[in-house]
């Protein structure tokens, strides 16, 4: 596919930094008229005569009106982020001043950029493929080290290189099989079926690993919601405060103190966990407001990725605990039993056989590190290796599943000795879905949708 679509040769402008008071604010201009647009505002030098990748300090003016003292960073295409002539105007971080600069650029021929249009132009000009471009958005949104490293791995082409290798090998075999069709009457075979079987098995294996990585990728990208539930006075709010290392929730001996859910986030080994402290669950609530809180607790329990069931190890009976566990397992809820106030029981009474249970004393901050490890292990199920490709995008997952289906069809076709023309169709289908991921096969509408989710200046 020729990525260069029509209508992408004008000049655009947008702030590249957040609209907030700061030391520095950056406005980005790109397109074939970028230098002439900014030249109207920077009369002290002839910008077209300056070398690429140079900095220039001076006054930015609109006619006789001085806008700001700025630093211009010049990037001449194709050696720029977008592949086009680009100028970044670094001025003082006043949102008002930034808007003046943008309006002045528009006055002299630029237009306001659409969300993600700078990165979209980088894709259309062959600076990035679609997976790399989408990883730029992931990097901007990353709020953990795991999210950062995963996005950087894909920006550097980790995922793209795997797909490129698969695509090249499939194209080679597809070409050989299609070549056989030209010699159908001579009963010749150009594509080595044994090697083709081996390739299909390899592609299936890689595709399956990528599909399976999405579960971890979803955790890295979106975090894990963890609902802390239990009866009143079980120690839920004390546990929340321990995990956060701060007094976030009110702790009281009065039952039913927590009336609404409290949500906070913690970072465990580079993965974000959203902790939700809920109202204590009991049969006979003290008032209407507490009843509403209990209803919300049950909703959070069913919607959370993981439930911490906190119970007073000295007050909860075995039958009550079994009833709660049966409920979790019946509804398919992932859970950890948190036996609180364990300092008050005999150590010999602690049942170490239950691998889904951890004993703590929240008031004394005991057992909290073990609980953090169990929370992490339950969500991640192993160490996060961000040097390997991890799928974080649902669009990629869908295409990979379609690739796997197509490859399975090709293998079944070989097993049943289907003619080459039918095999070629299935191979081309797999190639189509590979191209969808990298952007070699996609529509302009789909591109607009993907990049519309980016921020304006990127």
Image (tube, grey):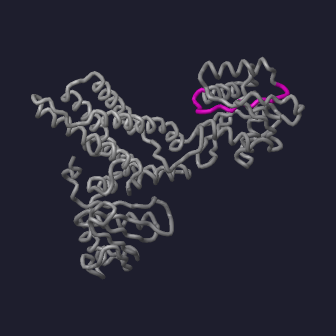
Asked if residue 314 lies left or right of residue 330, the reply is right
Residue 356 percent coordinates (x, y): 70, 30
Asked if residue 33 lies left or right of residue 81, the reply is left
Residue 293, by quadrant, is top right
- Residue located at (80% from left, 28% from top): 351
Is 47 or 319 nearer to us in this picture? 319
Residue 69, by quadrant, is bottom left
| Residue 410 counted in the magenta span | no
Asked if residue 169 lies left or right of residue 220, the reply is left
Residue 83 percent coordinates (x, y): 28, 62
What residue range appears in magenta?
302-315
- Residue located at (62% from left, 18% from top): 330
Above or below: residue 247 compared with residue 49: above
- Residue located at (50% from left, 44% from top): 221
Is 277 or 266 nearer to us in this picture? 266
Q: How many marks?
A: 0
Above or below: residue 374 compared with residue 85: above
């Amino acid at each position: 596919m020729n990525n260069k679509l029509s209508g992408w040769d004008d000049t655009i402008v947008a702030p590249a930094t957040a609209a907030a008071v700061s030391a520095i604010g950056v406005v980005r201009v790109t397109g074939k008229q970028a230098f002439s647009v900014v030249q109207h505002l920077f009369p002290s030098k002839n910008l077209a005569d300056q070398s690429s990748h140079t900095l220039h300090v001076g006054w930015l003016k609109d006619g006789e009106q001085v806008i700001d003292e700025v630093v211009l960073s010049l990037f001449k295409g194709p050696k720029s982020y977008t592949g086009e002539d680009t100028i970044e105007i670094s001025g003082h971080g006043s949102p008002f001043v930034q808007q003046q600069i943008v309006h002045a650029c528009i006055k002299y021929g630029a237009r306001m950029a659409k969300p993600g249009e700078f990165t979209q132009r980088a894709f259309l000009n062959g600076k990035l493929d679609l997976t790399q471009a989408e990883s730029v958005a992931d990097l901007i949104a990353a709020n953990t080290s795991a999210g950062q490293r995963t996005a950087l791995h894909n920006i550097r082409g980790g995922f793209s290189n795997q797909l490129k290798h698969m695509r090249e090998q499939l194209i080679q075999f597809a070409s050989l099989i299609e070549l056989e069709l030209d010699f159908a009457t001579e009963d010749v075979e150009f594509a080595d079926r044994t090697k083709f079987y081996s390739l299909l098995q390899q592609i299936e294996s890689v595709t399956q690993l990528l599909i399976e990585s999405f579960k971890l990728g979803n955790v890295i990208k979106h975090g894990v919601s963890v609902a802390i539930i239990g009866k009143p006075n079980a120690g839920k709010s004390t546990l929340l405060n321990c995990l956060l290392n701060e007094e976030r929730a009110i702790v009281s001996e009065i039952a039913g103190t927590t009336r609404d859910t409290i949500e906070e986030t913690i970072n465990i080994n580079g993965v974000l966990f959203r902790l939700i402290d809920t109202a204590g669950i009991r049969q006979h609530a003290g008032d209407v407001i507490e009843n509403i809180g209990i209803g919300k607790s049950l909703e959070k329990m069913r919607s959370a990725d993981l439930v911490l069931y906190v119970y007073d190890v000295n007050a909860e009976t075995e039958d009550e605990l079994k009833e709660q566990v049966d409920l979790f397992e019946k509804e398919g809820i992932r859970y950890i039993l948190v036996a609180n106030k364990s300092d008050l029981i005999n150590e010999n009474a602690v049942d170490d056989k239950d691998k889904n249970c951890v004993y703590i004393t929240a008031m004394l901050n005991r057992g909290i590190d073990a609980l953090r490890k169990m929370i992490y292990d339950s969500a991640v199920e192993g160490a996060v290796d961000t040097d390997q490709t991890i799928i974080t995008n649902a669009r990629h997952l869908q295409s990979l599943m379609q690739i796997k289906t197509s490859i399975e069809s090709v293998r079944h076709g070989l097993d049943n000795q289907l003619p080459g023309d039918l095999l070629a169709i299935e191979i081309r289908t797999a190639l189509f879905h590979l191209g969808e991921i990298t952007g070699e096969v996609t529509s302009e509408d789909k591109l607009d949708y993907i990049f519309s989710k980016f921020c304006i200046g990127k």
